[in-house]
Image (spheres, grey):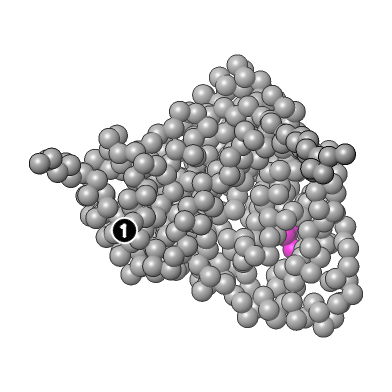
């Protein structure tokens, strides 16, 4: 009889989709740049000093004082009625008539993308996206086994004519777009182009997923109506919203507004994922919306963010090499930089981090051929003084990269 331990059989392999889809480059960069001395333009993090911590804490206290059992109990998958009513009212006031039953509350708007992928996509289905595109959307569609195809565009967003050509050729299930203050570019799609996108979807048969996490953070210019509000889009547009950027991301509260059949399918998918979004967070958010003036808070936040955007715009010319170009967003959290073609921002990042500053390279945001000279900068987390110092460090790192190597002895 052998005294040795029996050999262990290997465990089954991971699903192919789990192996094929990588992690978030932004999260990886944040882990590397967590040192406090690093000025981090990489993360898409709201400024924590602007959170209305007192107001949110008061809302939680009221909920626990008045309805503790309900706050700590299971809830409905669709979401707490008081929160859905408040969100429907805000959506209606902004130009899109909405009933509470039109909404499904999600655990952050990121979950809405996963639910939609589950409800709509079979492995091999085609999804159209902007170029460049929000990273986590690419992850969600990749995990669903979708084939992701980029729609060509320009500084105003995707090109409706190119969209129609791709719809005819590729027969996609859906188009995903962030038309207002897009992540990563900060650009906003004009109203006429939104109407054209809605018309293509109506004529050709296409779902539109319109993601709007940043739309209330406008610093200048006039608000542009949602694609969902345009004729032809009513029965085929899913509008995603979030409290993360206007209240606090730690609440993990988002929502989707969708036609009944798709909304019901997403609710079934949510039941399998987490049953429902935490009850206490929903009730506290509803209480906050009832007791506080969220619009006034957003105006204060937007005023500060606008100053920080201006500080970054003022410093870019002195920090970046000649021939660089960048966007000038009217709101949101990001701007997009294109360096001269000789620069590879992924290869350059380790040297930049050694100067105690960080950005996100642009390559991972591309579903098609990446533009390796691009990068994303977040301007809302740091003060104007910190932004100036961060750009000084970035400029020093880029100038070192431009120096010819020293001659060998």
* Magenta highlight: main SS: helix
* Picture residue at 70% right of the left edge, 81% below the top: 58
Residue at the spot of label 1: 355
Taking 362 as reference, is 71 above or below it? below
Q: For the C terminus, give its image quadrant.
A: top left
Residue 79 percent coordinates (x, y) = 82, 58
Query: Can I make out residue 223 in this image?
Result: no
Q: Residues within 10 Å of mark 1 (few under 14, many from 20)?
A: some
Q: Is residue 235 above or below residue 296?
A: above
Residue 216 is situated, as x and y percent measured from the top left of the image, at 56, 58
Asked if residue 87 is among those painted magenta in the image, a careful observer would answer yes
Left or right of 37 in this view: 202? right
* Residue farthest top in this picture: 169
User: In percent of the image, x 81 and y 53: which residue is there?
Assistant: 274
Which one is in front, 14 or 227? 14
The part of the chain drawn in magenta is 86-90
Please give the name of the residue rendered at 54% of the width and 52% of the height, measured from the top-left corner.
27
Residue 347 placement: quadrant: top left
Please name the residue shown 62% across and 66% down the image: 248
Total residue callouts: 1
Q: Nearer the viewer, residue 96 or 237?
A: 237
Q: Quadrant of residue 227?
A: top right
Judged left or right of residue 141, residue 60 is right
**Is 247 above or below relative to 64?**
above
Q: Nearer the viewer, residue 135 or 14?
A: 14
Residue 231 figure quarter: top right
The N terminus - image quarter: top right
Instruction: Tell which of 364 and 333 is nearer to you.
Output: 364
């Amino acid at each position: 009889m052998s005294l040795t331990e029996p050999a262990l059989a290997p465990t089954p392999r991971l699903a192919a989709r789990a192996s094929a889809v990588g992690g978030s480059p932004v999260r990886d960069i944040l882990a590397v740049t967590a040192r406090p001395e690093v000025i981090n333009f990489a993360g898409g993090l709201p400024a924590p000093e602007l959170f209305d911590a007192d107001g949110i804490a008061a809302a939680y206290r009221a909920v626990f004082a008045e309805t503790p059992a309900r706050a700590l109990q299971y809830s409905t998958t669709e979401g707490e009625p008081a929160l859905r009513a408040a969100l429907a009212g805000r959506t209606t006031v902004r130009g899109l008539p909405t009933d509470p039953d039109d909404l499904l509350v999600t655990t952050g708007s990121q979950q809405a993308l996963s639910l939609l992928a589950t409800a709509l996509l079979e492995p091999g289905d085609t999804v159209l996206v902007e170029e460049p595109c929000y990273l986590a959307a690419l992850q969600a569609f990749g995990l669903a086994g979708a084939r992701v195809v980029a729609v060509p565009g320009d500084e105003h967003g995707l090109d409706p004519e190119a969209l129609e050509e791709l719809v005819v050729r590729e027969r996609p299930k859906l188009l995903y777009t962030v038309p207002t203050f897009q992540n990563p570019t900060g650009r906003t799609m004009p109203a006429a182009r939104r109407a054209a996108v809605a018309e293509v979807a109506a004529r050709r048969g296409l779902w539109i997923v319109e993601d709007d996490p940043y739309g209330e953070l406008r610093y200048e210019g006039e608000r542009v109506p949602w694609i969902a509000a345009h004729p032809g889009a009513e029965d085929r547009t899913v509008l995603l919203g979030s409290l993360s950027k206007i209240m606090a991301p730690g609440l993990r509260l988002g929502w989707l507004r969708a036609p009944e059949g798709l909304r019901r399918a997403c609710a079934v998918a949510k039941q399998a994922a987490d049953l429902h979004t935490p009850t206490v967070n929903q009730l506290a958010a509803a209480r906050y919306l009832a007791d506080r003036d969220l619009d006034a808070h957003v105006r204060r936040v937007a005023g500060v963010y606008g100053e920080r955007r201006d500080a970054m715009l003022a410093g870019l010319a002195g920090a970046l090499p000649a021939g660089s170009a960048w966007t000038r967003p009217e709101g949101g959290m990001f701007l997009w930089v294109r360096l001269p073609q000789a620069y590879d921002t992924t290869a350059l990042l380790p040297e930049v981090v050694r100067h105690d500053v960080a950005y996100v390279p642009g390559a991972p945001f591309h579903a098609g051929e990446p533009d390796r000279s691009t990068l994303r900068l977040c301007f809302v987390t740091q003060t104007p003084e910190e932004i100036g110092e961060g750009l000084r460090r970035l400029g020093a790192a880029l100038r070192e990269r431009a120096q010819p190597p020293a001659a060998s002895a």
